[in-house]
Amino acid sequence: MKQVCQKKSKANTRVFFILLGFVLLTIIPIFTSCNKDDDGNGEFGSKNVKVQFYTTNLSFVRQTSNESQINEVQAMVFIDNGDGGGYKYNYSVEGTSLTHSDTLSTTFDLEIYTEERPVKIFIFANSNGIISNNIPLVGETENEVKQKLIKPVTSTNITGNFPMWGEYLLPSGISSTLNNTITQLKVLRSIARIDVSTTKTPSDFTMTSIQAFRVNSQIQIAPNNYTGSLLVSDPSIPISSVATITTIPIPVIANNSESQLYLPESEAPTSANQVAKATCVIVGGRYKGSATVTYYRIDIEPNIAGYPSGQILRNHHYTLNIVNVSAPGWPTPEEAAENISTNIEVGVQDWTDANINVGLDGNDYFRLSSRNLEIERVSGSTTYTFVATSVLDYTIQWSDAQGNPLPQTSPGEVIDDGVLRVTKSRNIITVEAIADNPSTNSILRYFLIVAKRAHIVVSVVHAGI
């Protein structure tokens, strides 16, 4: 067993920061414990005690095998000695015998000591180099350790080998009684995923590139704060990080960019500084077939109550859906980044916060940003719900509230009752009023989505006079 220990100087002071969620992974750790004193007496003196933790996959948002890949594992053991100071770092061990059982889970072995005192174990993936350059000192607190483990960010886009972190609490210590304990160990990626898509035809707008401006220069591998479900609501940004990085433009093919742009966390600037200081995405594209590429700014503004504009959180999955482009953009990416977003309409969806999810046949899924839509009464009004799915051949059809298809209607990609037209694509379902609602009352309509065995009913309220 490789044990890494250094002594903590009493001159060190505690530094605290505040932190927090695209896609959860699971890991199956197998802990093999040996006694630190090796005296062979009693339960905690036993040798070669194997403690296994079994888990199941958690997959409720899109993720790729690249995002789930774990190439190395290291564990840090923290012990609470009962002095009121909380858990303190004790030693580290590297994970061995890594096995990828599927694209979502990894198994590995750790050799650690039995311990009677409460234990907390930090699990780090793809972070060995960062840890070796910032080895904790024995006696350091959790926060002190977290704030030492920093990864630099450059203009080169982050493409893989994502640092991850998770923890497991053992309040009764490590002993043979933990054999065959069933649990789930989840880990957080330290980055966020940004996808950009458009529903416009190439004759209206052709997206050619994406990049990000004012990106933070450092990533803190482990968050300062999180909820019990291992989700974060605030970013954890190193005190020495500065939002000065401009990422290299990524070419876009077929008006869609998925699994290409990954960013560190960002905090939301004040309202007065939104334009000048917020991290933003710049899209390059050709408007109405023009040979000239112009540039448009997109801000991270999910339509979620209490979500500050410009905030980016780790392990979250943001989809930027371009729903309309009305004119050419700025001549350069720099000009677009320095000015308010214009001539482009974008719907931003944070899929980690969405609660509409249907799991299908193992790895297949279908998610909607909303099942309840409202549209104004006048012709030309539009509304939409965003889609995240692995099923490309789903259909829509007019139905009743229970999901029974209406007579004389057929499933398809476009449905039209003479007043409303519903059009579906891979990333969005759009509802358009093609005639005024002639009634003084709102009219409630329903349409049915069929995706493999999933049947999902969406309501549409068409406002009256």
Image (tube, rainbow, N blue to C red):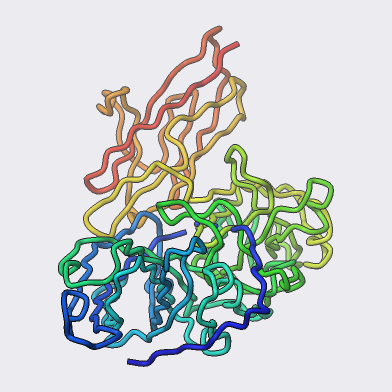
247 is higher (above) or lower (below) than 285:
below
Image quadrant containing the C terminus: top right
Any part of residue 256 in sight: no
User: Which of 313/323 is in front?
Assistant: 313
Taking the view exactly as shown, the residue that stands out farthest to the top is 440
Q: Is residue 142 left or right of residue 332?
A: left
Q: Is residue 203 left or right of residue 96?
A: right
Give coordinates of residue 237: x percent, y percent: 65, 65
Give coordinates of residue 280: x percent, y percent: 70, 60
Total number of numbered discs in the rendering: 0
> Residue at position x 77%, y 56% from top?
328
Q: In terms of image quadrants, where is residue 59? A: bottom left
Q: Is residue 211 left or right of residue 83?
A: right
> Residue at position x 46%, y 45% from top?
354
379 is higher (above) or lower (below) than 190:
above
Any part of residue 215 in sight: yes
User: Which of 430/113 is in front?
Assistant: 113
Q: In terms of image quadrants, where is residue 436? A: top right
Give coordinates of residue 403: x percent, y percent: 28, 28
> Residue at position x 25%, y 61% from top?
183
Give coordinates of residue 173: x percent, y percent: 30, 68
> Residue at position x 50%, y 65% from top?
258
